[in-house]
Image (tube, helix red, strand yellow):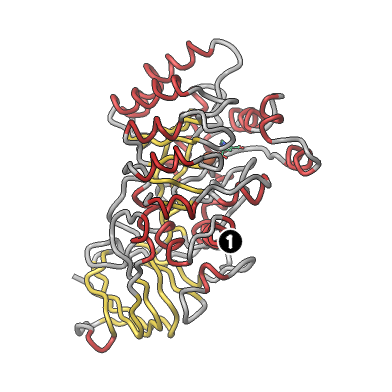
């Protein structure tokens, strides 16, 4: 067994494995002058350098801080075309929902994505994933959802499958916006044809639905998520982005892995999340890009919920290609402390994907970790506009992307 002892770590943030809720999100374990022992892609030992076990192979990390690899639990990284005209209209005052209702927005991305081949989708998504990776995201969730029809949804998931050979990805089938005609038949087809096929072919780990006035109702969302559960897939929900129409309550009732967005959540939704195991995923890039209210991150943690942070990387509501920036924005816009934000981007984001083997630098966990350009880990939440991440290690291996400079 090849063991490597990583040394010369000014400060290591260990954190505890598994989802952390409420005040426990602030409990980080910091080790000064630390060392990290890795074998076969897993962490074997973590502690002060002076107490490290002897090994044949040592790797000097240069006196900088080490944090767990970030997990981005919510992206729409596969799309074709652009939304630059929507962006111009929006900054001049046309609301996102109105653009969608007029047939633009997500529907515009569906036209371009539906016309693209798997190879084209792979080529478009690769640099986006590489950028997320360089920003510290060692595991990334990727949704479908811009398919005009089922064949296009499957092409998106096939693109994710191809990219899984290059990145640690978790694929999700997203049922995003309903067709303008034959809506009931579409939902039936999703439940009886698309979901069973995706489950059979192992193309997704979870199913997500956009539950919103301009998208699917609570009843439609329930039918789709119940079909997902019957097919053995996990569930997630986009809810309370613009209106709290009952999506969060549905996700909590069904034991969904996560409910994501929550910008319009009020006391009832916060209470539901505080009482459930469902992770509350907030995405401050949407707040910044759409200029809308922030999700109540502070209130969710104070109520005892488990909060995660995602980039929501997508062409319409969050062109945020950095997991580190999402972390940094959550501190400013959603009032998380730096420690809470790190927990939200690591173990809690992993829990939002149903994963408990990553996100903490503790024995038995995957050896996914980041070195920073700084000796103090707090430069990770502090930095805006340049990348504080120096190197990205996945399963104990240094991974770099040509053309992507941290
Ligand atoms: O998470 N709101 C729904 N879906 C995405 C936006 C996708 C898009 O605008 O293309 C989101 O914000
Ligand atoms: Fe989203």
The quarter of the displayed image where residue 94 is located:
top right
Of residues 385 and 265, the one nearer the viewer is 265
Above or below: residue 37 compared with residue 346: below
Is any part of residue 131 visible from this angle? Answer: no
Pick the residue in front: 288 or 64. Answer: 288
> Label 1's element?
helix
Q: Picture coordinates of residue 324 (x, y %)?
A: 52, 62
Q: Quadrant of ligand 1?
A: top right
Q: Residue at (55%, 46%) from the top-left corner?
A: 125
Residue 231 can be seen in this image: yes
The quarter of the rendered structure image containing the N terminus is bottom left
* Position of 59 relative to 281 (above/below): below
Would you name the residue on which mark 1 appears?
332
Which of the 4 image quarters holds residue 190?
A: top left
User: At 33% from the left edge and 42% from the top edge, which residue is drawn?
Assistant: 275
- Which x, y percent locates residue 230? 28, 24
Q: Residues within 10 Å of mark 1 (few under 14, many from 20)?
A: some
Q: Quadrant of residue 55?
A: bottom left
* Observer-nearest of 378 and 132: 378
| Mark 1: C-beta under 8 Å from nearest atom of ligand 1 | no
Q: Is residue 268 above or below residue 42?
A: above
From the top left corner, tell me how far across and down residue 234 is, in percent.
33, 35
Q: In the shown orientation, is residue 35 left or right of residue 89?
A: left
* 62 sits to left or right of 312: left
Kindly identify the residue that appears in the image at 51 percent across and 31 percent down: 210
Query: As drawn, is 355 to the left or to the right of 97?
Result: left
* Residue 259: x %, y % from top left: 43, 40
Q: Determine the residue located farthest toward the front in the rendered image.
A: 267
Whether residue 170 is situated above or below residue 153 in the rendered picture: below
How many labels, in total?
A: 1
Q: Which quarter of the figure is the C terminus placed in?
A: bottom right
What residue occupies the far bottom of the structure in this picture? 50
């Amino acid at each position: 067994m090849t063991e490597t002892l990583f040394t010369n770590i000014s400060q290591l943030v260990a954190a505890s494995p598994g989802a952390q809720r409420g005040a426990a999100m602030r409990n980080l374990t910091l080790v000064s002058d630390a060392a990290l022992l890795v074998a076969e892609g897993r962490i074997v030992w973590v502690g002060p350098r002076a107490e490290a076990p002897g090994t044949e192979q040592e790797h000097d990390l240069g006196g900088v801080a080490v944090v767990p690899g970030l997990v981005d639990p919510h992206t729409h990284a596969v799309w074709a075309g652009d939304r630059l005209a929507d962006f111009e209209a929006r900054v001049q005052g046309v609301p996102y929902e109105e653009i969608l209702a007029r047939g633009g927005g997500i529907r515009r991305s569906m036209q371009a994505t539906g016309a693209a081949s798997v190879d084209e989708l792979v080529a478009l998504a690769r640099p986006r994933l590489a950028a997320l990776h360089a920003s510290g995201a060692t595991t990334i969730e990727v949704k479908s959802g811009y398919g005009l029809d089922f064949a296009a949804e499957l092409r998106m998931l096939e693109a994710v499958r191809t990219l899984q050979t290059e990145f640690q990805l978790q694929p999700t089938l997203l049922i995003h916006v309903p067709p303008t005609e034959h809506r009931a038949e579409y939902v039936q087809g999703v439940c009886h044809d698309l979901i069973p096929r995706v489950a059979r072919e192992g193309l997704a780990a979870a199913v997500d639905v956009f539950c919103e006035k301009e998208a699917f109702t609570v009843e439609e969302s329930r039918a789709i998520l119940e079909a997902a559960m019957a097919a053995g897939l996990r569930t997630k929900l986009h809810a309370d982005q613009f209106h709290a129409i009952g999506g969060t309550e549905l996700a909590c009732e069904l034991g969904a892995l996560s409910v994501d967005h929550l910008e319009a959540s009020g006391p009832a939704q916060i209470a539901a999340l505080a009482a459930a195991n469902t992770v509350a995923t907030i995405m401050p890039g949407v707040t910044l890009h759409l200029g809308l209210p922030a999700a109540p991150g502070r209130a969710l943690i104070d109520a005892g919920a488990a909060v995660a942070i995602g980039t929501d990387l997508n062409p319409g509501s969050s062109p945020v290609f950095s997991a580190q920036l999402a972390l940094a924005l959550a501190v400013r816009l959603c009032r998380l402390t730096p420690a809470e934000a790190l927990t939200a981007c690591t173990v809690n984001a992993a829990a939002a994907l149903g994963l408990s083997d990553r996100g903490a630098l503790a024995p038995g966990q995957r050896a996914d970790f980041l070195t920073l350009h700084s000796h103090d880990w707090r430069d990770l939440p502090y930095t805006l506009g340049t990348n504080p991440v120096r190197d990205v290690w996945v399963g104990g291996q240094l991974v770099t992307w040509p053309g992507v400079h941290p």
